[in-house]
Amino acid sequence: MGNRNLRVSELIKREISDILHTHMRSEAVMITITGVDISPDHRNAEVFFSVLGDEVAIDEADQFLRKKIGYIRGELSRRIVLKYMPKLRFTYDDSLERGNRLLQILDEIEEESKG
């Protein structure tokens, strides 16, 4: 990814997070935007999010974000000047869970080697 794409991705990530936590505070309190992957032509963006909670919370957050895509994209267009405002697609980011599981496995291996 080029330097410009990285800057645009970080800007979109920061602005979406700000939109969620200022305009939709009560609904989006448990949602964290973890990253944005934008296409080279800036027409499409995949927005990764994580949620505190179980599968039900993940599904509720996913439905909430899909319902608010139009509003979020409109707010982004008011805040960011780009030739094309990307179409957003929200995807749940399970990398934090996978990282925690890996750490648990490493801790178990360490305990077994001590005992």
Image (spheres, helix red, strand yellow):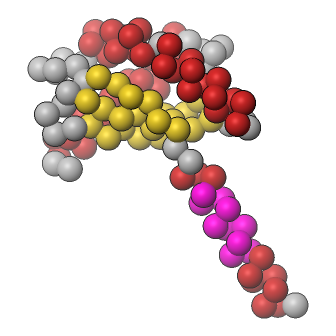
Residue 106 part of the magenta-drawn span:
yes
- Provide residue 106's location: percent of width, then percent of height: 68, 75
Region of the chain picked out in magenta, as a range: 98-107
- Asked whether residue 10 is in view, the answer is no
Relative to the observer, which residue lies in front, 52 or 88? 88
Q: Quadrant of residue 72?
A: top left
Relative to the observer, which residue lies in front, 108 or 60? 60
Left or right: 18 as drawn, with respect to 60? left
Q: Who's the residue at 41% across and 40% down the image?
A: 35
- Provide residue 113's location: percent of width, then percent of height: 78, 90
Left or right: 52 as drawn, with respect to 31? right
Q: Quadrant of residue 50?
A: top right
Left or right: 80 as drawn, with respect to 4? right
Q: Quadrant of residue 24?
A: top right
Q: Who's the residue at 59% across and 29% down the image?
A: 31
Q: Who's the residue at 73% across and 38% down the image?
A: 54
Question: Could you tell me how many numbered marks the image carries?
Answer: 0
Relative to the observer, which residue lies in front, 57 or 110? 57
- Provide residue 16's location: percent of width, then percent of height: 41, 24
Residue 94 part of the magenta-drawn span:
no
- Provide residue 47's location: percent of width, then percent of height: 40, 33
**76 vs 59: above or below:** above
Magenta span main SS: helix
Quadrant of the image containing the C terminus: bottom right
Tell which residue pokes out farthest to the right in this image.
115
- Asked whether residue 66 is in view, the answer is yes
**40 vs 16: above or below:** below
Q: Who's the residue at 72% across and 67% down the image?
A: 104
